[in-house]
Image: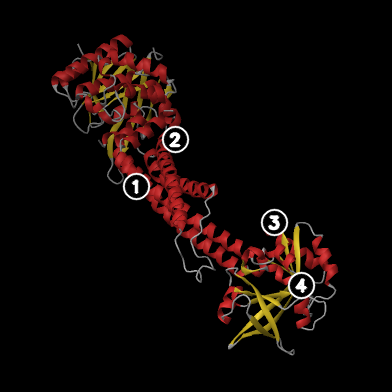
């Protein structure tokens, strides 16, 4: 294929100029690979921490009711649903917690620790004390780390819980939990039976948390439960719709920047090709005189755009990968309050990032090559030959 | 008789310009026999190059017909014109227009590759052609490593690579000194005799024109002389 060899020779004869356009394509690809990896890593991290610290689907009381009565039947029904790994019933109420002069408003959850651990992997977040301390319905309590800090308490201290309409009750701190979420500032956990007693509620609960195998089927499960029972089931996706929408909106904005970055590298390809076309006017005229079809001329210059683009993309992928590895290895710290509790830039390096950045770049480079290639193919051979 | 006439031009007219009309060719009739070695001469702007571009189907006339082997090429499609140019015509211009990024043999191979001939066969033919123009030993030299005369000889080898019926030369010696011009002229004449190909040359050089078979003199787009050289 003579078109290919002409295209290669043209590029080879403009090494310095082509080097610059290859660098610009490579850098744009590398930047976008790093950017996609960051965004995906960020999203995955947010989802992970959300999903890890929240039930995948939560069942709340029926409409106009505050509690779930006779919940054992519902618990059995939920356990039998497809994909359900664990269910955990809890009673949640508001309370005030006092230690000496410090008072904090809290959300007190009564749980069955082994079930709650299966749904939320609580055990791994316990930084002091033991989760099993809540197995027996005694006056034991586990506090969120921030809450403990604010109350200036530690394991073994006794705090006083005040629930409206009841007399104050002392609880012994038997554990501290840190999930890395804002819940650490307001959450406290006790034994389910003990908390029910505290609220004088009898054997009722306020919600059931469910863990499932495929987190993205949470919405479907919630819909099924909604349909088949009168209870209100909400998936983690619905509960966190705000943050997920925020990330998706951010993704759309980022795409605009990607297109702009690629356009810049596309212009550098268009620039070098225009230069080659201008320089090779006589040559193009002679090729036409020798019987080269206009299509072949078009093909020669599009091939040049492809070759330049391809080299740029390959180099860009390598640079992008190295950038990613460097960023992962140095762990750039970021302020957690701004990044939903993340304290470093997470990167998710997947082959898709490279494929997306590479293919987008190739498409834009080809589009950039069309104009100069068309210009070359439309030349008048007589004018072209005599222009030299 | 008409079959033997390789080129038959009838009432060929080319008008350039919008607004101010310039008649580059004005009702030209011309028959050229196979194997002829013809010079088209005339002052600047007389229409010689225009006539040559028409015969080489690089340009289209405003009116009139050009029959190559009985086929009217003025109405041919772009693709057909490319094919005819590649297979039936060879071009030599004042400037050699060799591809600077390719060496001599690769340049000569180019029309063969465009014609779809395999690389190995194309190389063999190209080497033979270079041998014929006396540049086989320079086969691997690039145009910038060859002299003006040598480059023009490579351009001749390239023009003849596809064994065309008609070779068109637009001032092929215009850039060369008289010694190099003579070498090129003798080479063209030798090839014309050996291959029985039609050569049509546009030239300013009356001395060279006198060495051809026939002289066509154009003035203001009209043929004013069409005479055999004695």
The answer to whether any part of residue B16 appears in the image is no
Residue at mark 1: chain: A
Residue A216 in picture, x, y percent from top left: 68, 58
Q: Are marks 4 and 2 on the same chain?
A: yes
Q: Nearer the viewer, mark 1 or mark 3?
A: 3
Mark 3: give few (<14), some (14-19) or many (20+) Cα within 10 Å.
few
Q: Earlier in the sequence, mark 4 or mark 1?
A: 4
Q: Residue at x 34, y 17 (%)?
A: B126
Q: Which residue is mark 4?
A: A136
State the separation of the CA atoms marked 1 and 3.
49 Å
State the separation of the CA atoms marked 3 and 2.
52 Å
Q: Quadrant of residue A62?
A: bottom right
Image quadrant holding the C terminus of chain A, namely top left
- Check disc 1 and report its element: helix, strand or loop: helix
Q: Which residue is mark 3?
A: A214
Q: Which residue is mark 2?
A: A295
State the separation of the CA atoms marked 4 and 2.
83 Å
Query: Is residue A314 toward the left or the right of residue A388 in the image?
Result: right
Q: Are marks 1 and 3 on the same chain?
A: yes
Query: Is residue B79 toward the left or the right of residue A57 in the image?
Result: left
Residue A15 in picture, x, y percent from top left: 31, 39
Q: Quadrant of residue B59?
A: top left
- Check disc 3 and report its element: helix, strand or loop: loop
- Check disc 4 and report its element: helix, strand or loop: loop
Q: Is residue A22 above or below residue B202?
A: below
The answer to whether any part of residue A134 appears in the image is yes
């Amino acid at each position: 294929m003579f078109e290919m060899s002409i295209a290669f020779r043209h590029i080879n004869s403009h090494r310095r100029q082509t080097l610059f356009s290859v660098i610009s394509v490579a850098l744009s690809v590398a930047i976008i690979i790093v950017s996609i990896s960051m965004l995906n890593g960020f999203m995955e991290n947010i989802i992970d921490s959300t999903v890890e610290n929240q039930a995948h689907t939560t069942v709340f009381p029926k409409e106009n009711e505050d509690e779930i009565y006779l919940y054992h039947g519902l618990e059995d029904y939920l356990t039998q649903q497809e994909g359900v790994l664990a269910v955990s019933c809890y009673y949640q109420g508001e309370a005030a917690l006092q230690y000496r002069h410090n008072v904090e408003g809290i959300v007190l959850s009564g749980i069955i620790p082994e079930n709650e651990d299966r749904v939320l992997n609580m055990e791994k977040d316990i930084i002091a004390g033991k989760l099993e301390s809540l197995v027996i319905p005694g006056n034991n309590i586990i506090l969120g780390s921030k809450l403990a800090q604010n109350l200036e308490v530690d394991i073994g201290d006794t705090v006083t819980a005040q629930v409206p309409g009841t007399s104050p009750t002392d609880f012994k701190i038997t554990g501290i939990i840190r999930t890395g979420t804002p819940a650490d500032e307001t959450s406290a956990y006790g034994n389910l039976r003990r908390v029910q007693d505290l609220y004088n509620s009898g054997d009722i609960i306020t919600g059931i948390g469910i863990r499932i195998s495929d987190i993205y089927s949470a919405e479907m499960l919630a819909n099924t439960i909604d349909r088949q029972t009168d209870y209100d089931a909400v998936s983690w996706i619905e509960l966190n719709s705000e943050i997920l929408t925020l990330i998706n909106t951010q993704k759309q904005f980022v795409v605009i920047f990607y297109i702009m970055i690629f356009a810049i590298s596309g212009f550098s390809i268009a620039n070098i090709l225009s230069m080659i076309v201008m320089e090779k006017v006589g040559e193009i005229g002679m090729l036409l005189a020798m019987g080269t079809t206009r299509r072949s001329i078009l093909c020669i210059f599009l091939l040049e755009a492809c070759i330049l683009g391809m080299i740029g993309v390959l180099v860009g992928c390598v640079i992008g990968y190295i950038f990613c590895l460097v960023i992962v290895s140095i762990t750039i710290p970021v302020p957690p309050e701004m990044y939903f509790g993340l304290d470093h830039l997470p990167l998710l390096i997947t082959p898709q990032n490279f494929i997306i950045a590479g293919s987008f770049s190739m498409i834009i480079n080809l589009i950039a090559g069309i104009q100069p290639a068309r210009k070359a193919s439309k030349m008048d051979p007589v004018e072209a030959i005599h222009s030299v | 008789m008409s079959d033997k006439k390789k080129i038959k031009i009838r009432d060929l007219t080319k008008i350039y310009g919008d607004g101010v009309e310039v008649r580059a060719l004005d009702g030209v009739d011309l028959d050229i026999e196979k194997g002829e070695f013809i010079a088209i001469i005339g002052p600047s702007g007389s229409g010689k190059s225009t006539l040559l571009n028409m015969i080489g189907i690089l340009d289209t006339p405003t009116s009139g017909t050009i029959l190559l082997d009985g086929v009217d090429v003025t109405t041919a499609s772009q693709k057909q014109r490319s094919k005819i140019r590649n297979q039936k015509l060879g071009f030599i211009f004042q400037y050699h227009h060799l591809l600077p990024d390719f060496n001599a043999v690769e340049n000569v191979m180019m029309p063969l590759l465009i014609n779809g001939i395999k690389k190995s066969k194309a190389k063999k033919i190209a080497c033979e052609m270079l041998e014929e123009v006396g540049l086989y030993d320079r086969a691997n030299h690039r145009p910038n490593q060859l002299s003006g005369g040598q480059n023009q000889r490579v351009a001749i080898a390239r023009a003849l690579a596809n064994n065309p019926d008609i070779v068109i030369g637009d001032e092929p010696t215009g850039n060369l000194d008289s010694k190099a011009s003579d070498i090129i002229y003798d080479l063209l004449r030798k090839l014309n005799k050996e291959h029985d190909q039609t050569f049509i040359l546009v030239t300013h050089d009356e001395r060279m024109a006198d060495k051809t078979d026939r002289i066509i003199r154009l003035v203001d787009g009209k043929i004013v002389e069409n005479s055999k050289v004695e």
